Amino acid sequence: MEWEDYRRSDNVEDRRSEDYADNSGGIGGTGIGTGHLGLGAIVVLGLIGWALGIDPRLLIGGAEMLNGGSGQMQRPQQAQTSAHSRTTGTPSDQIGQFVAAILAQTEDVWTDILPAQKGVKYSPPRLVLFNGATDSGCGGARAAMGPFYCPNDKKVYLDTSFFRDMKTKYGGGGDFAYAYVIAHEIGHHIQDQLGILSKVQAAEQRAGSKAQSNAISVRTELQADCLAGVWAFNANAKYHVLQAGDVEKAIATAQAIGDDRLEKAAQGYAVPDSFTHGTAEQRTQWLNTGLKSGQIDACNTFGQ
């Protein structure tokens, strides 16, 4: 993926130098009080489970229980930090530069296509870089939970060790796969701007069973996958960023974190009613839908 020659966003809040005391027990996700985990969280927990021989469903289920068990996430206790430790601007290190470049591409693309396709002015979220743990409007953010979007403060949270670990410990990754993860979380911000996340929360609260609530969650996550594809289509049309093999790497990432793949790896069979993010086939289908169409309206996962 080409990114080195493109502009960097200064809408990055770098907290990687700050200390943090987390007494809340809160865990991130989309932060809408329903126990959802972000795309990055599923990747991380799946990898940890496979590496340690632990059923990934136990890790994911436990995390979602902590995230949404009470419907409200507690505010964490933050250690005293100096003003200079929470800076906003373009980081100078390579990983920070990469994140800022991808964030800039999401800003430029969505600033064009959200008004053009939906008549809504794009309001870019801030992306928070942190090490280990930090506070968020949705509770405590922790590296082990992967990247996530918090609608309460309109920010994406990312510990960049997530990328490093995927590459050095697990042999995965690639620039476009990393960009896809960021774009998926930005997809949740697009859902927020379009009023979808608030409707999702209300629908899940009305759901008559856990299976019905899970089905709504699946549609929400698949739409974020599709919106990541919409971004990639338009970014490539605008900047010619994609190289040979990039799309295949992103699709491989989507397939690897399908609910059916995780459950079959853990227990030898899948339980569809327990799915919260979609099967490998569904995630691939909707990412491809966005990649091929470039249209937000093509991502109507709730209408199918």
Image (spheres, helix red, strand yellow):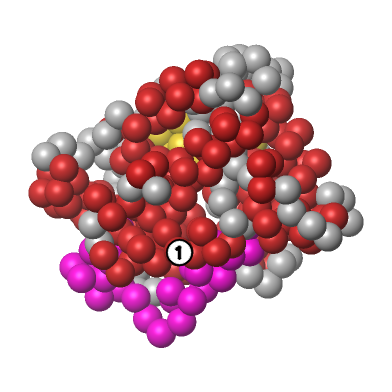
Residue at image coords 63%, 64%: 256
x then y, percent, for residue 28: 58, 32
Task: Tell me if mark 1 has few (under 14), some (14-19) or many (20+) residues whose alpha carbon lies within 10 angstroms of its own.
Answer: some
Residue at image coords 64%, 29%: 210
Q: Is residue 192 above or below residue 221?
A: above
Amino acid at circle 1 = Gln
Q: Which one is nearer the viewer's eye here, 95 or 219?
A: 219
Q: Is residue 221 above or below residue 133?
A: below
Q: Is residue 102 above or below residue 135?
A: below
Which quadrant of the view contains residue 208?
top right
Q: Which residue is mark 1?
A: 285
Residue at image coords 71%, 67%: 170
x then y, percent, for residue 120: 15, 37
Q: Is residue 211 left or right of residue 104?
A: right
Q: Is residue 229 left or right of residue 137?
A: left
Which quadrant of the view contains residue 79?
top right
Residue at image coords 83%, 60%: 268
Magenta-drawn stretch contains 170: no
Give the prevailing secondary structure in the magenta stretch. helix
* Extent of the magenta region: 231-257
